Image (tube, rainbow, N blue to C red):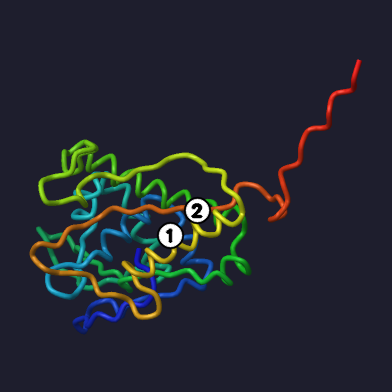
Amino acid sequence: MGSMDDVRTQPADAAPGVRWIEDVAAFKAMADPIRLAILRQMMAPGSGDGLRHWSVKELAAVLEEPQTKLYRHVKQLEESGLIKVAETRLVSGIVEQRYIAAQSSLEIPRDFLERSATHDEKADLFAAGIDAYRRDLLAAVRSGRVSLNTEALPGASYSRPLLMFGDIRLSPARAGEFRDRLSAVLDEFVGSGERIPSYNGPDGVELGVLIGCYLQDREDPGTSPQQDPPLPET
């Protein structure tokens, strides 16, 4: 969905860049896997530097969803201001609207999450993001666009998949180091402060990335896990 700021130059009718989600309506509109998938598709760069115009029919074909199913999702995204009508035209006697994303990147400020979003709403958004990633990965594997073989393509180490599922238990110091090093990698490749522009060269490759790191328990840092009391001697 994007990270920090997006400073790409856009045509006049394209999205202005990053949008900070600070209203509940937009936040709730994002918290659905179908709507999130629509947004991700519409915010992907089109030809040139701008964003593509999409009809509901075109979105349905790419997302492999029934066209009738998408109408209400598109309407809700429009009502929340996340997408907008870019053009209206007559196709075979039927008025067709084509839409464009109202931004090319989305960010949710931490204070908004803490101030305005309930636990259920935050959980719904995170679940929608994970489900959208799962949908993309499954579709890519089934179509053969992604291979989960462990061998990299010749001269392309980035083609080797890197996947991890599960939990790890570390000391507080090592846990802090783990998080800081992940954060440093994100800052280097995604950008912090001023966004690093996307690479648009003909040899560019797209990487599907999902990173999650969160505290499972609520133990006081620096204390050892509570031990079970010893059994009484007999």
Q: Residues within 10 Å of mark 2 (few under 14, many from 20)?
A: few
Q: Residue at x 48, y 39 (%)?
A: 166
Q: Amino acid at mark 1?
A: Leu
Q: Quadrant of the N terminus?
A: bottom left
Q: Residue at x 31, y 57 (%)?
A: 38
Give coordinates of residue 184: x percent, y percent.
41, 66
Whichever of labels 1 and 2 marks the residue nearer the N terminus, that label is 1
Compared to 31, does 69 lie above or below?
above
- Asked whether disc 1 touches disc 2, contact meaning CB atoms under 8 Å apart, the reply is yes
Q: Residues within 10 Å of mark 1 (few under 14, many from 20)?
A: few
Helix or strand or loop: what does disc 2 sit on?
Answer: loop
Q: Amino acid at mark 2?
A: Cys
Q: Nearer the viewer, residue 14 or 179?
A: 179
Q: Nearer the viewer, residue 228 or 71?
A: 228
Q: In the current view of this chain or complex, which residue is farthest to the top?
A: 234
Image position of 80 (left or right of 155): right
Give coordinates of residue 224: x percent, y percent.
72, 46
Helix or strand or loop: what does disc 1 sit on?
Answer: helix
Give coordinates of residue 9: x percent, y percent.
22, 83
Foreground label between 1 and 2: 1
Image position of 1 (left or right of 228): left
Q: Quadrant of residue 146?
A: top left
Marking on residue 202: none
Q: Residue at x 8, y 65 (%)?
A: 202
Image position of 141 (left or right of 80): left
> Label 2 belongs to which residue?
213
Q: Residues under labels 1 and 2: Cα distance?
A: 9 Å
Give coordinates of residue 162: x percent, y percent.
31, 45
Q: How many numbered discs?
A: 2
Compared to 11, does 224 lie above or below?
above
Q: Nearer the viewer, residue 205 or 128?
A: 205
> Label 1 belongs to which residue?
182
